[in-house]
Image (spheres, helix red, strand yellow):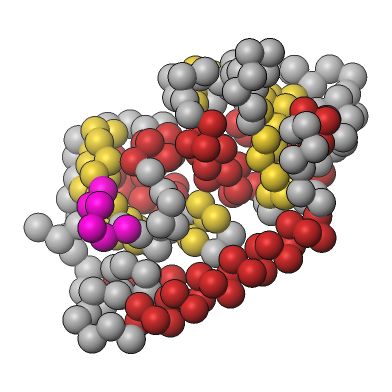
Amino acid sequence: MLTGDIPPNQTIYIKNLNEKIKKEELKRSLYCLFSQYGRILDVVALKTARLRGQAWVAFSEVTAASNAVRQMQNFPFYDKPMRIQYAKTKSDCVAKAEGSFVPREKKKKQEEKAERKRRGEEAHQSSVPNGTSAQNGGTTASFRQGNPSSQEAAAPNNILFIENLPHETTSMMLELLFRQYPGFREVRMIEAKPGIAFVEFEDDVQSSMAMQALQGFKITPQNPMAITFAKK
């Protein structure tokens, strides 16, 4: 166990990260990966020579950080196993970010502002009459109305159809989630239709296992994945 004598706290320290990944992509991927454990206050990753290959994730609750340390230890992240421990002090995240850490109350206000903007965009897109909004910006609304599989379920097959993804989701983020299951082949995303993706496995048994394991997985607190078999 890498935590040693450091007492549990809300911030985890991650090292052995792939240094070739761009900072913003790294931060988005870490947020995507760790948001399943609880509300994230901030993700800090710096590309200075001394701090490359390292990152800090600050949760709102200690229990969330503890679950992340326990369950994600040695998880293969961009082809390298992550080494995770608690940050030495709660202020490590602040110090290493060189003052860029956003205080909790300010962060909350920013999140509320972003949420209001997102809802406004969804409301606008849902008014588009061409019927595409259900797969574009309006996926969250359609998901809340019910499981899309209840409308017209496709027969089990080796390709999964993923909906309700945040628009900033990348194929690499989804690959990190799905490649831990046997038979994974590839992720396909459609640039013109953000919010959806296709994930291919070798057979329908393996795709079913991944579906059951990741159904409802929250890439962000507002975006539980809706997974069905793709229609052929």
Q: Nearer the viewer, residue 204 or 6?
A: 6
136 or 7: nearer the viewer: 136
Residue at the (64%, 69%) spot, across then down: 113
Residue farthest toward the top in the current orientation of the protein: 50
Q: Quadrant of the N terminus?
A: top right
Please state which of residues 84 and 170 is positioned toward the viewer in this rendering: 170
Give the vertical position of 96 relative to 52 (above or below): below
Image: 45 above or below 126: above
The residue lying at 34 percent from left, 41 percent from top is 171
Residue 19, given in percent of the width and then of the height, sits at: 52, 18
Asked if residue 143 can be seen in this view, the reply is: no
Tell me which corner region of the image, top left, top right, bottom left or bottom right, holds residue 49.
top right
Q: Is residue 58 left or right of residue 129?
A: right
In the image, taking residue 229 as reference, residue 80 lies left or right, namely: right
Q: Quadrant of residue 91?
A: top right
- Assess whether residue 70 is covered by the magenta stretch: no
Give the overall secondary structure of the magenta segment: loop
Q: Which residues are magenta?
A: 189-194
Give how far across and how far down residue 41 sits, in percent.
72, 49
Identify the residue shown where x is 82% and y is 60%.
Answer: 105
In the figure, residue 71 lies in which quadrant? top right
Rendered location of residue 111, percent (x, y): 66, 63
Residue with the most extreme left position: 232
Could you tell me which residue is drawn at 40 percent across and 63 percent down? 164
Q: How many marks?
A: 0
Residue 68: percent from left, percent from top: 67, 37
Side of 39 where 192 appears, left or right: left
Q: Quadrant of the C terminus?
A: bottom left
Asked if residue 53 can be seen in this view, the reply is yes
